Structure formats: C-alpha cells, structure tokens
Image: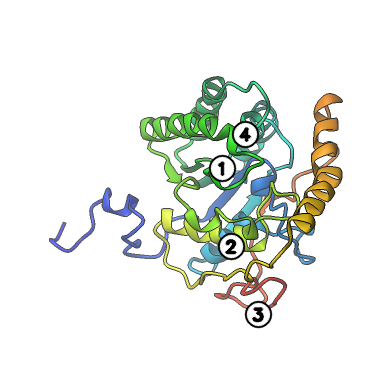
Amino acid sequence: MGNNDPSPDDRRTPYTPNPDSHPWRRMVAIGDSFTEGVGDPDPAAPNGLRGWADRVAEVLSTQVDDFAYANLAVRGKLIGQIIDDQIEPALALKPDLVTLSAGGNDVIRPGADPDAVAERFEDAVVRLSSQGANLVVFTGIDTNFTPVFRGIRGRVAIYNENIRAIADRYDCIVADQWALKEVQDMRFFDDDRLHYNTLGHHEVARMVLRALNVPNDLQPMQPDPLPLRTWRAARAGDLVWAREFLMPWVLRRVRHQSSGDHITAKRPDALPVFLEAPGQDRGAGPGTPV
C-alpha cells in the first residue's frame, strides 16, 4: 500500500471519501416510520413517502451499475416486531448493505428500559451481519431542543451508548443522529413534532452518505425563518397538536394498536432505483421538483 493510499480504517471516517466508487450493489433498509419516510411526502413513491433511505439509495444508484434497493420498514413497529417481521425477508434479499434503525418506538414509551432494548438490538445485528453485509446503525436524536421529549433525553443517551458499543463489537457503521445538530430545530420536523419533514430527511440522508464516505452533491436545505407568534397563538398551536397527534398516539398505546397496523413495506423487493434527473436530488427545496 502506497503512502497516499487510505487504510481501511481511514475509510470509516466521515472525512475521507471512498477512493473508488462505493462497493455496494444491493441495499436493504429495515426499521420503523423513520426509515419508511414518514413526514417526507412524494406522490411518485410507492406509498407516497420518500425519506432519507430513498434519498441515500438514489445517490448510491447513480455511482455504480446494477444497484438495487429494498425498504422493509413499517411505521409504528417496536424492535421485537422489526426483528420478527423484517430480518428474515432482509436476509433473503442477499444485501451487501443493510441499514438498521430500531428501538426508537420502544425508548419513547413510559418506563422503557434502554438496556433491554439494546439486548434485542444486538440480536438483530448478529443476524443481519451473518452474511457479511456492511451494517449501518443509528443513534437517537438529542431531544433536549424539544419540550415534548426533553424528559427522555437521559434514556436516549443510554440507548445511544449501547448502540455505539454494539457497533464497535460488530464493526458496524454508525450514523450519529445525536451529533447532527442541524436537525435539532422544530423546522426540520413534521406537524406531528415526532417525524422529520422533507428538510429533516434530506439532512439525515446527507449524514448517512458522510458515514458511508460516499461523495455526493446534496446541498443543505435552508428552513424558512421562524414566524413571529404571540404567546396566545403558540398555545393555540399546542392545543391543536395535542388534539390531532398526541391524543391519538396515547389512545393507540392504551388500545395496544400501532400506526403500522395493516401497513405493508413500500419496497419489499430489491429493485433498481429510477430517477427523473439522475445525479440530482429531487428535493432541492420543500415541494420543489428538480
């Protein structure tokens, strides 16, 4: 190896691009609403949603031939359901790149044990790594910026440290949402205050591509300035949010229901990625096609 050649360890950093085109030909994404793309509408997508995983696959597909992508994620799923329903179908597709985000819906529940979640997560990592695929895992976002989830910040931090330890043991690539300060702003979230909007999914896609060391032309999206609101208007907005999003979420918990009941994976098979404008991002601005 020459003096200027990057070592394998160098290629794990977010600052050294792959010296050649990336090595992956078949990507499978598994998880919950975060990976399904909830909050990032796209009428051209199979389920009307795009999301960070689609965006990453679009970039990867432009750089190599014969690239295929499947997305098995379904909103509302707990880690046990993801393990039971998605891992075997994912392995059957023979991927060489797998993204795994699971446990978020468990951790936000009252009384959740992040250590117990980590045990299930490690089981998933072991199984998904069994065929030699590269595995990307995600930390949770730092919730300190949002009053709704600030109270679970410590629980998320414990979950994240467990994820990092598992990633170290099994040589996973870490996509670090906790360190992604750009999205710690409610302008990057949908009206439900839980899921990323188009801006958020775009920034996560950029972060994942950095973690994979894949050069790309995706540029930051700038959110609109914060509107000036009176205290009364802000409280009225809180009441609308509680009625339209919080109460239905609570009722689903009480009834042991999930927003993903009767929802199927949007891309159950590994298929080519077709772009209207190859090499460009279709979401250059909120609601603005390229």
| SS assignment at label 2 | helix
Judging depth in this view, the residue of 166 and 144 nearest the camera is 144
- The picture places residue 59, in percent across and down from the top left corner, at 54, 66
Q: Mark 3 sits on what residue?
A: 290
Disc marking residue 45? none
Look at label 4 and name its amino acid: Ile
Q: CA distance from mark 4 to mark 2?
A: 26 Å
Q: Along the polypeptide, which appears first: circle 1 or circle 4?
A: 4
Marks 3 and 1: which is nearer the front?
1
Judging depth in this view, the residue of 229 and 170 nearest the camera is 229
Say how many tags the image has: 4
At label 2, counting other C-alpha atoms closer than 10 Å, the crowd grade (few under 14, some 14-19, many 20 or more) is many
Marks 2 and 3: which is nearer the front?
2
Look at label 1 and name its amino acid: Thr
Q: Mark 1 sits on what residue?
A: 143
Q: Mark 4 sits on what residue?
A: 87
- Of the 4 image quadrants, the one containing the C terminus is bottom right
Q: Is residue 68 left or right of residue 255?
A: left
Question: Is residue 5 depicted above or below 166 in this figure?
Answer: below
Q: CA distance from mark 2 to mark 3?
A: 14 Å
Look at label 2 and name its amino acid: His
Q: CA distance from mark 4 to mark 3?
A: 35 Å
- The picture places residue 283, in percent across and down from the top left corner, at 64, 71
Is residue 36 in view? Answer: yes
Mark 3 touches mark 1? (CB < 8 Å): no
Q: Mark 2 sits on what residue?
A: 202
Marks 4 and 3: which is nearer the front?
3
At label 3, counting other C-alpha atoms closer than 10 Å, the crowd grade (few under 14, some 14-19, many 20 or more) is few
Colour mapping used in the image: rainbow
